[in-house]
Image (cartoon, rainbow, N blue to C red):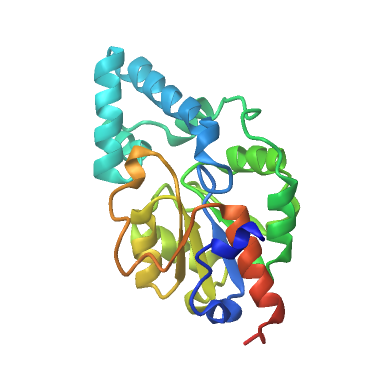
Amino acid sequence: MNPRDNLPIPKPAAALAHIDTWIFDLDNTLYPASCRLFDQVDRLIGRFIALELGLDAAAARSLQKRYFREHGTTLAGLMRHHAIDPHEFLDFVHQIDVTPVEPSPALDRAIGRLPGRKLVYTNGSVDHAERVMRRLGVHPHFEAVFDIVAGDFVPKPEAASYRRLIERHAIDPSRAVLIEDLPKNLIPAAALGMATVLVATDCEWAAEDASGDHVHHRADDLVAWIEAVADVLASAPRR
């Protein structure tokens, strides 16, 4: 039996035949959360706060998570309340070892089968995204990375960030899909008319807002989900 036979293929799968822009989140989406790559970033964010604000590790951690909940990203909170230089922050927290991410020829092949444009949309930086994409082996498929800098440091899930993405890359939301591991980041996308895909993860912050009309499709295994969709689209008439 093909392991994809039991996957929740979109219903009807041919409804995705109109999609011409595939927008992927980066961290814990293009690569599996199980490799714990983002744990390195998480620790560096705490260290940055401790050094910049003169806090002990526990106080820095508490502030880090509070700003993440209240502002969408820790950086947004640091900019608002402490006038932190965002470029210094991004350079510091992305000095990580990307080797925990395994190269994925399967993901490379799967993404290559999807018809249309592919973009990465991240609250991180272009440099971080490109390092991870090259490690995965998927970089050639992507037209561009829309990062937090391109968004004028307005992060997902702020609606203004999505509007900047749409304007910058001339996206028709009704013909686009956003693939994300954080349910809250799918809410504005759905409101704008995009299709949405929630990628399963065991991260604690991914549990909120995981049910509702803003989640159109779910992918327990991203590669298998893309392959299943690509199989259907290969035989479905394009619209």
Left or right, 137 with reference to 202: right
Q: Position of residue 67 (x, y in %)?
A: 27, 36
Q: Quadrant of residue 31?
A: top right
Q: Nearer the viewer, residue 20 or 71?
A: 20
Q: Position of residue 122 (x, y in %)?
A: 50, 49
Residue drawn at x 59%, y 69% as measured from the top left: 21
Query: Relative to 164, is 98 above or below?
Result: above
Query: Relative to 176, is 127 above or below?
Result: above
Residue that lies at the very extreme toward the front in this rendered image: 1
Residue drawn at x 58%, y 60% as measured from the top left: 225
Q: Quadrant of residue 160?
A: bottom left
Residue drawn at x 30%, y 23% as measured from the top left: 61
Q: Could you tell me if residue 116 is visible in this image?
A: no
Image quadrant occupied by the C terminus? bottom right
Q: Nearer the viewer, residue 148 or 137?
A: 137
Q: Nearer the viewer, residue 137 or 75?
A: 137
Q: Nearer the viewer, residue 9 or 132?
A: 9
Residue drawn at x 28%, y 55% as measured from the top left: 209
Query: Relative to 90, is 55 above or below?
Result: above
The mark tally for this picture is 0
Q: Could you tell me if residue 226 is visible in this image?
A: yes
Query: Relative to 235, is 153 above or below?
Result: above
Image quadrant occupied by the N terminus? bottom right
Q: Position of residue 78 (x, y in %)?
A: 32, 33
Q: Position of residue 43 (x, y in %)?
A: 43, 23
